[in-house]
Every structure is written in structure tokens, then in C-alpha cells.
Amino acid sequence: MSSKVVKFSIIGFGLYVIFAGAVISLYEDVPDQMNWQDRQTYNNRYINKLTIDDPINKDSIIKVLGSPDLTEAKIVDSTTYQVLFYRTVLQKSDGITTKDECTPLLFKDGKLIAWGKSAFEQFDSIKV
């Protein structure tokens, strides 16, 4: 091989590595554009990292996880309770997302107060 071919090959490979590195480091995951398997994994990972001490509100969750798969809300004595359901596990491959395939996140006046199975039980027990 001539030195020109080797030189251009090395330069081309170097540019490829730089481009790939930039894409990997700068690319932001957008949940609404993911396929359902990737979004489910993404949701699960994010929700598993939550801690009750974090001052998390509904808007910040929606910004990170995108639109919820399901949602319910109640207003009791001027307090708003809302539960957002995010798909985290496949139960039945039927193209329909159901509550049993989701992790519920419970908000009181926009602030996250509980998540997981007990969150929906708390929400369900609130009498209007």
C-alpha cells in the first residue's frame, strides 16, 4: 500500500472515532421516540434510581420520562392527587399497555410522594 492510502485510512478512522464518540456523548435519549422495549428499560432504570428525599415534581418526571402511558387524578379538599403510570414490564404482548405493566408514580399537588404498587393503593384509597 502506498503511504497516501495508509494516511487517509488513519485519518478516516480517526474522524469516525471522533464522530462516534460525539454522538454517544451528546445524544440525549428522548423517551417518546424510543421503541417500547427501550422505553420500558429506560423507565425502569430511572424509576429504580428515585429516592424519596429528592424534591421531584411532576414536570421534571415528564421531562425525563416523557408522557405517561396512563394517568388518573382526583381533587380532594383543594388538594390534587395524580398518578402517572409508566410502562416497566411486559405482561402480555397484545399492543395494549395496562396498569399491571406499569409502575405508578403518585403526586400530591405536583410533588412526588410515592411510587410502586403502594402508590396506586394510596391513590385508590383516597375518597373524593
Image (cartoon, rainbow, N blue to C red):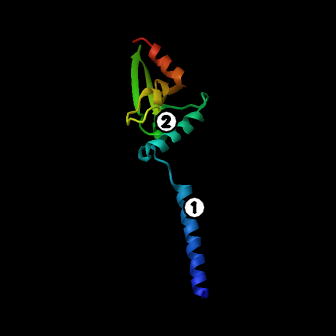
Q: Is residue 78 visible?
A: no
Q: Earlier in the sequence, mark 2 or mark 1?
A: 1
Dot label at residue 21 = 1
Dot label at residue 61 = 2
Residue 39 on image: x %, y %? 47, 42
- Label 1 sits on a secondary structure element that is helix
Residue 49 on image: x %, y %? 60, 35
Tell me if residue 12 comes above or below residue 28 in the rendering: below
* Quadrant position of residue 47: top right
- Label 2 sits on a secondary structure element that is helix
* Quadrant position of residue 5: bottom right
- At 52% from the left and 23% from the top, the residue drawn is 117
- At 60% from the left and 82% from the top, the residue drawn is 6
Q: Is residue 101 visible?
A: yes
* Quadrant position of residue 99: top left
Residue 125 on image: x %, y %? 46, 13
| The C terminus, quarter of image | top left
Amino acid on which the number 2 mark rests in the picture = Ile
Tell me if residue 103 comes above or below residue 125 in the rendering: below
